[in-house]
Amino acid sequence: MVTFDYKKTPITQIADYIIMYSAKSGASDIHFDPRENGLMVRIRVDGDLQDYTLIPEEYERNLTTRLKLLANMNITESRLPQDGAIKGKFGNLDLDMRVSCLPTNEGEKIVIRILDYTRSLQGIDHLGFSEENLKRIKRMIQVPNGIILVTGATGTGKSTTTYSILQELNKTETNIITVEDPIEMNIEGMNQVQVNSEIGLDFATVLRSILRQDPNIILIGEIRDSETAKIAVRASITGHLVLSTIHTNNSLSTIERLLDMDVERYLLSSAMTGIISQRLAKTLCPKCKVKRETTPYEKKIFKKVLNLDVDSLYDANKKGCSECHKGYKGRIAVQEVLEIDDEMRDALNDENLEKDDLRRLVYTSNVTTLLQDGLHKVLNEQTTFEEIYRIIDIDSDSNEIYSIEQKNDNNNTENTQKDTVQETTQTVPPPAKEETIIQVPTVPKQNLNPNQQTPTPNYTNQVQNEQPAIMSSSPIAKETASTPVITSSVKSALSMMQQSNKNNQPQIINQTNPQPQQITQQPPTPTVPQPQIINNT
């Protein structure tokens, strides 16, 4: 940490020196965090915050006032958030900065965003796009009408990419109008409008007006609400090329976000030209990088996503060198470029489209995903696997890609199996129908009298054709329903039998209630040859 001589150095010089040092160090943001013992100054270099100096408590108010004056803020207001901008020369540096002030319990926190548009002025060829992604972008911006969205989280370089595209399109014969909040970069040859919500000049109001200004290309700083999204889409289908940004993670979530904003499907399908999603990863220092072997997990990811066998990678030297910070120097963009084709337009126009079907269309189309582009940059020694793991949910994204590819392979396998089974089963005879044989026992004949035989009652028809319907659950009803009717001839035979056998124990024969037995005999099952499974994945 740096310590200043506050007694000999004015606070104005200290504030200017902090800004100049941060800009020369390649910092993207300067944080002035209020603490109990003073104001902690931290600078963000290559995405990481570093402690720089601690302003003593007695000088905290003076430094805050100086920064608010530079940003044209109200120095008497400390209870409400404020936004401002600083633009001018600091030493030999020409800087353009945005300033945000936020009241906290310890005091006012100030964050300065240093805008560096040197890459934007160089054009899209210098933004680190892969060859295939660069071709897609150039095809997209040649379309005379439609909407192109640049997506990503805060601080992922969306504005840099957008301005680079505008620089590519900024020609004498085109009328470019931008609507921004705030205007981050002044570009010669463009008409730029600053949004002011306090007086009712919001994105929707400005968009309605600039449509009557005969524009060719319209830049919307950010799509924040449903109204802005609908106007932007409608403007794109009326002969205008619309560029805008939106805070989403990838192409799939961008489409879902627009649908959640109640944008009509038929408008979205006809207006959408392409989606550019990006994130920033630290650039590997070329002088002190270290080569190492890949871990089993890294080999698995490379094999699953890129279908490559990778044995070694380059990693950052944690000690660093004189030209880097812990093995990294600068940042590089990891991009995903989705070019909307006719198949996807038809799918977007389908109201019954499921999320899984939309995901399959996005990931199986001609698109290089964020994970794929990041892994390619690791192989090109531009960044590290650790950085890609930090900015991308590798496990989730790789599983999505792998599951889609696996599902497509399984579908092909299933179709092959169905064809094989169908061909095999055509030669197999159909199984024989099962037959049920009911055997009803007959009542044995009783020799009651040598001269007389009692005929045996026939209960076959009664059992098979006259089964009683039990309408009550009472035991009496069940017993009555299950008891067969005994004729008078049977009664006389029983009485004669009892008289002839008084001295003997009677033999009880259950002939009054002959219950039939249902015996189901299944024929032997024919031997059916099993179809051969060619590939069971």
Image (spheres, rainbow, N blue to C red):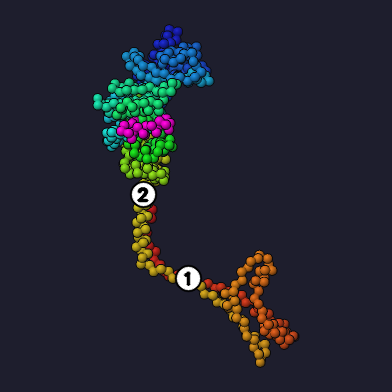
> Residue 175 location in percent, x, y?
29, 26
Q: Compared with residue 263, is residue 82 higher up or lower down, i.e. above or below? A: above
Q: Are marks 2 and 1 in contact (CB under 8 Å)?
A: no
Can you tell which of label 2 and label 1 is closer to the viewer?
Answer: 1
Identify the mark at residue 463; answer none if there is no mark: none
Badge 2 is on which residue?
408
Identify the mark at residue 434; answer none if there is no mark: 1
Identify the residue at horizontal 36%, vertical 34% (top origin): 234
The reply to whether the magenta stretch includes residue 166 is: no
Identify the residue at horizontal 36%, vertical 36% (top origin): 370
Q: Amino acid at mark 1?
A: Glu
Q: Is residue 8 left or right of residue 365?
A: right
Query: Magenta residues, as a range?
Result: 224-243
Q: Compared with residue 66, is residue 347 higher up or lower down, i.e. above or below? A: below
Q: Amino acid at mark 2?
A: Asn
Q: Is residue 153 in sight in this rendering? A: no
Q: Earlier in the sequence, mark 2 or mark 1?
A: 2
Spatial separation of the CA atoms under disc 2 and disc 1: 41 Å
> Residue 270 location in percent, x, y?
34, 39
Q: 446 and 455: which one is in front?
A: 455
Identify the residue at horizontal 57%, vertical 75% (top origin): 464
Which image quadrant is residue 295 in? top left
Label 2 neighbourhood size at 10 Å, few (<14), some (14-19), many (20+)?
Answer: some
Q: 434 and 194: which one is in front?
A: 194
